[in-house]
């Protein structure tokens, strides 16, 4: 997005610098950049979704480990902080596996060399690698988008969700760059409207035609033949290809399956959790009911009315036409295909 | 709802009275009653959903015919206004069949006897009959609700949607009166939040435990076994049992079907349109994109971002466990069963 600051940036040295996060809770109304100097602030920013999207959370957490250990007075304190800061970051949100993946990689780097500069280098490497993963996913997936197609997507999976072009949106950006012309239906993605606020913003900035729809409208439009392709991201993919993604994804998959519309998850290798046999083992975050009971800042709360707010759901791999990864497309989706593309 | 004025009431004589509508666009924040004295005001109120719900629209339109003809200077003018006021009312919204049904019944009454008092009597009869239909649906459906069940519902189908206890909610109110204890998950129902604003209000007023959920959360909760029964209303039911209802209903039906959760449409005989062979013939209203692009009064509009806003979708009868009517439960749902319960 041309007019926006970077989603995530490190400014300054490892010892004196800070993490800059574009505050996604304010978009599209206001562009505000958070200056994050300690782990507690970063945990709070991750929890309230100032930074969100599985890959972006991983990158932010990598820098968070630098923030967490830099006040260590000696080597013992360094290793103690490496552990405790990592634990605090991992506990910020449970579903996206990129978060523990990035933290554990940082902890391994810090164990190998108890050096702040080495840790910042490792975080920068994770950041740069994520950009490359986005590029590779975009290239692998772009041929799926046909000229004149209507592509439906859910939540935000673009430059605001990653360090690069995105996951599902990277596919769309790459297809657009190659000259394919298509239009997008963006699920608004209640309760926090990442589709209406963020995806619509990113696509419009590139000149890609986009219409926002209520999440409940997708199945009917799919039934009426108005959708040719569905591309979504993921927060964690189990060993058999079951994928946890923003709540509402599973319903899309059922509608696609009922009407023969191909639906792909687009996710980098860092989002796979091969230690989990299937999606039932993925922890699903339940968020504050207030997110559902308030809308755009105007409370609609009625005394004695509660809310349930699961942030994710799990789509069985067997409902997917494929999973687009940085290494190519897994299809059909099953444990063998996942293992041969990602495992080992 | 104890504290609320009636959804629809006629006040005064046929010649000098007016229609009172509880303005549902303001709930739950403000209780405002609209005083409607002419057809144009009623058409506008129906269009902006100040009165909504298929049966309530029908009742309001019946009174609207009285408003439309009462300035007739002579018999010819009476019949001309009977036609033109009816046309204007029917054109207000295309999907709910109760609207043309009620208008045509009023037109037949006016053709039979060109008397304002007779027309008001007919409107009052439609109003009173709808109350009785609600009672009968509640009684037919109440045994479906099991002790301890979690019942999911969509949009608003209660006292605010009808002249009586409702359609799907009438079943819940009657089960509750019989002593069955259960809890409700209410889809918030974007874009206009009839679930979060109206259904939650109605259930809470009766002491029935209710949690609001984002529409996209329903499929995942159904998959996790957290829903035992789904009850929804309808705006028009075709001859084979295909049912148009508030957008998002079809996705619920797919999730219920995938997980063996029984889903019932609850609709009075006045909502059946036996002239339509199947649901593909039901006109689906597409409403103003601004409803999707604004949230609770706070605009999230981004230049060059549009919206699609179909207000309804169609659920094939074959996905339903049954249709609860004022005459009993149609099940399984097919053209023969509909004809034997409703037709003839």
Image: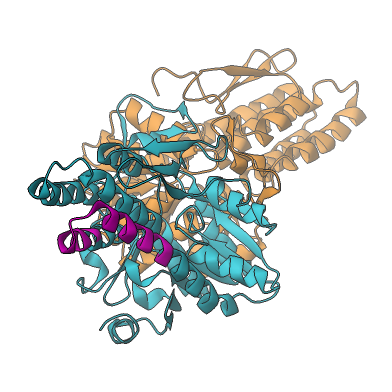
Chain colours: A cyan, B orange
> On screen, A240 above or below A287?
below
Residue A216 magenta: no
Q: Residue furthest left?
A: A76
| B163 to the left or right of A96 | right
Magenta-highlighted stretch: main secondary structure?
A: helix
> Is residue A109 a member of the stretch shown in magenta?
yes
Which residue sits at x=47%, y=48%? Answer: B233
Q: Position of residue A51 (x, y in %)?
A: 40, 46
Q: Nearer the viewer, residue B2 or B276?
A: B2
Does residue B316 appear in this view?
Answer: no
Figure label count: 0
**Residue, x 74% and y 37% (percent of image)?**
B89
Horizontal side of residue B67 vs A86, given as left or right: right
Split into 4 quadrants, where in the image is the C terminus of chain A?
A: bottom left
Quarter where residue A169 is shown: bottom right
Between B38 and A131, the one nearer to me in the picture: A131
Check the image and report above or below for A258 versus A204. Answer: below
Across and down, in percent, residue B313 comes to 56, 56
Horizontal side, residue A263 vs residue A106: left or right: right
Q: Looking at the image, is A160 positioned above or below residue B66?
A: below
Image vertical order of residue A118 relative to residue B296, above or below: below
Q: Please give the name of the residue rendered at 55% of the width and 28% of the height, measured from the top-left corner.
A: B24
Q: Toward the viewer: A276 or A328?
A: A328
Q: Position of residue B310 (x, y in %)?
A: 62, 52
Image position, residue A289 (x, y; %) = 32, 37
Residue displayed at 75% across by 24% down:
B67
Q: Report the span colored magenta.
A: A106-129
């Amino acid at each position: 997005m041309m007019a926006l600051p970077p989603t995530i940036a490190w400014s300054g040295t490892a010892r004196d610098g800070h993490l800059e996060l574009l505050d996604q809770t304010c978009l599209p109304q206001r562009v505000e950049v958070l200056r994050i100097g300690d782990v507690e602030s970063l945990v709070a920013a991750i929890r309230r979704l100032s930074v969100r999207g599985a890959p972006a959370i991983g990158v932010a957490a990598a820098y968070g480990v630098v923030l967490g250990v830099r006040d260590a007075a000696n080597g013992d304190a360094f290793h103690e902080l490496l552990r405790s800061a990592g634990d605090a970051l991992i506990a910020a949100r449970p579903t996206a596996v990129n978060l523990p993946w990035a933290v554990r990689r940082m902890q391994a780097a810090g164990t190998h060399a108890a050096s702040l500069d080495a840790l910042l280098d490792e975080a920068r490497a994770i950041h740069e690698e994520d950009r490359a993963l986005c590029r590779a996913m975009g290239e692998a997936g772009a041929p799926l988008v046909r000229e004149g197609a209507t592509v439906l997507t859910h939540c935000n999976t673009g430059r605001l969700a990653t360090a690069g072009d995105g996951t599902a949106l990277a596919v769309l950006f790459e297809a657009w760059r190659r000259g394919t012309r298509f239009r997008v239906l963006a699920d608004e993605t209640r309760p926090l409207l990442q589709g209406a606020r963020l995806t619509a913003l990113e696509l419009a900035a590139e000149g890609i035609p986009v219409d926002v729809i209520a999440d409940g409208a997708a199945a009917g439009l799919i039934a009426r033949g108005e959708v040719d392709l569905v591309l979504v991201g993921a927060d964690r993919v189990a060993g058999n290809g079951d994928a946890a993604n923003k709540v509402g994804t599973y319903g899309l998959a059922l509608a696609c399956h009922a009407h023969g519309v191909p639906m792909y998850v687009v996710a980098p290798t860092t989002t796979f959790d091969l230690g989990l046999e299937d999606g039932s083992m993925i922890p699903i975050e339940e968020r504050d009911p207030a997110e559902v009971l308030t809308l755009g800042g105007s409370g609609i709360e009625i005394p004695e009315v509660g809310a349930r707010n699961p942030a994710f759901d799990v789509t069985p791999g067997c409902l997917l036409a494929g999973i687009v990864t940085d290494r190519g497309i897994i299809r059909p989706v099953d444990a063998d295909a996942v293992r041969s593309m990602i495992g080992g």
